[in-house]
Amino acid sequence: LVGAHLVVDPNALESVAVSQARQLADGSLKPKSKKKSWMQWAMEDTPIGRTLFWQQVDKMIAKNTGGHYPAAYAIRDVIKNGQESGPSPAARRKALEYEADRFVELAKTPVSTALIGLFDGMNAVKKNRFGEPAHKTNTVAVLGAGLMGAGIAQVSVEKGMRVLLKDQEPGFVARGEKVIASNFDKKVKRKRMSKYDRNIAEANLIPLADSDPYWTKHFQGADMIIEAVPENLELKHKVIQEMEKVIPDHCIFASNTSALPIGELAKASKRPENVVGMHYFSPVPQMKLLEIICHDGTAKEVAAAAVDVGLRQGKLPIVVKDVPGFYVNRCLGPFMVETTALIAHGVGIEQLDKTIKKLGMPVGPITLCDEVGVDVAFHVREFLSNADLGVRMNGASGPNVLKEMIDQGMLGKKSGAGFYIYDKPGGKKKGVNPEVARRLPEFVEKDLKLSDQDIGDRLLCRFVNEAVLCLQDGIIERPEDGDIGAVFGCGFLPYTGGPFRMLDERGTQQYVDMMMRHAEAYGEQFVPCQLLQDMGKNGGKFYK
């Protein structure tokens, strides 16, 4: 065994191991077995106990997979069959043959193909298409110590980068440090991080505030700045100009904006070729996706450095064109508008969440809105509605529920109240917000008594159509980027492999026909894009 010589006498290891193996083979050495407790005996050795045990296993599988992953059920069947087959050599051989048959059966399923494709896509985006960066990024300065800034700082120090975490007030920075320390404590408790590694990571974090007289000295050694300040173009312009008075010429300025055009941000810079977008997803330590956005003037070596930093942070970087909403938020825009339209057609907020979760999304659209923040969702929706999506942002009418919620301070999970209420800001969900429930009938235009199938199709096709349009317009370069972005950016049905693999499996013409039926019933926002229509007519597939 590798490393065994470090814990046992290497001279005695081989002889003892051989001796033990021979005794086990001839039966002179009996493995020590722990006496079963009465509970173990009742659950494992009685018919009623075994029946109850497998019922609980079935419930657990259904809860964790939603019935979308056949491997979990096959594993259950294999274990159950082995348990019931008996200990004889013939029975064991038959049980192993059954296991092999089930493995072959699983390998042929669409879910297997989709997940293998997703794995291949992950490997594809891990290759830096821009090549090796000219200058390795060792010191990263993060502007803004909120949840996003603290998350970016955490994933950077964990991977050995030196991080300057700066905010306006010392108290803001202290809160960011507290978030990072709390996350490290949880990882150490769960044995996912050693105390030594935590100490090294924390030593790489340098907290700074505007009042610190030496912050400019620190920033003179920065290789990259990642700003995570509020979504305001004027504010970001001001930040760029202030930073360029201090940072070295080679320093890259990366913006974590979720929607603002990178080209517009770069107009405030003396070195626009050094400006790039790095859009992280919340919560940063858990979400694997990173969108890299290059404007027309971004230098290749800058893009290479941005991808390199993302890969070192453990992210899956996809390169996206500089357009409003980039890729994931651009797809989510019509999806969220359709959520409002479904509420107007009589679908309750809990029903919306349950229906989408049943399809295989990790959270429903209402919970997603609360998670990202009602104010952020409103900002992205308003920005995209005034951008270049046209009729694709149609469908919602009546009172602007998001705006009214913001006016009342109901910003979602972070404020303790949004569509749902929470036991504390950032805490656990308790139930539907009574204030929202009271006002909900005002937003219903007509209850269409929609089925779960209609709800799911209407929501998902708005997302899928926008994803295909992004490929059509060159916003993403490959279907792999679109699938990785959708699955790891917002949890799009992982068992399908993403929107493009889902279309290949389901059939593009069938999907086009479904969308055209919705277009006739609800409006032109459901008309499929040209590439989707062409793929349907030609019977083409996105993957060969």
Image (tube, rainbow, N blue to C red):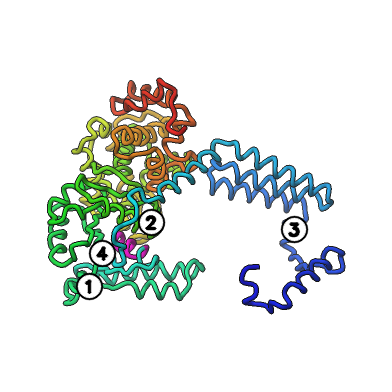
Q: Residues within 10 Å of mark 2 (few under 14, many from 20)?
A: some
What is the chief secondary structure element of the magenta stretch?
Answer: helix
Which mark's residue is nearer the viewer, 1 or 4? Answer: 4
Tag 4 residue: 223
Nearer to us in this view, 179 or 157: 157
Q: Which mark is residue 42?
A: 3
Left/right placement of residue 91 relative to residue 293 reads: right
As shown in the figure, which amino acid type bears the numbered disc 3? Ala
Instruction: Indicate which disc, 3 or 4, sits on the residue closer to the N terminus.
Output: 3
* Residue 539 position in % (x across, y down): 44, 23
As shown in the figure, which amino acid type bears the numbered disc 1? His
Q: Which mark is residue 391?
A: none
Which mark's residue is nearer the viewer, 3 or 1? Answer: 1
Magenta residues, as a range?
A: 147-155
Tag 2 residue: 311
Instruction: Indicate which disc, 1 or 4, sits on the residue closer to the N terminus.
Output: 1
Give the CA distance from mark 2 to mark 3.
Answer: 50 Å
Tag 1 residue: 218
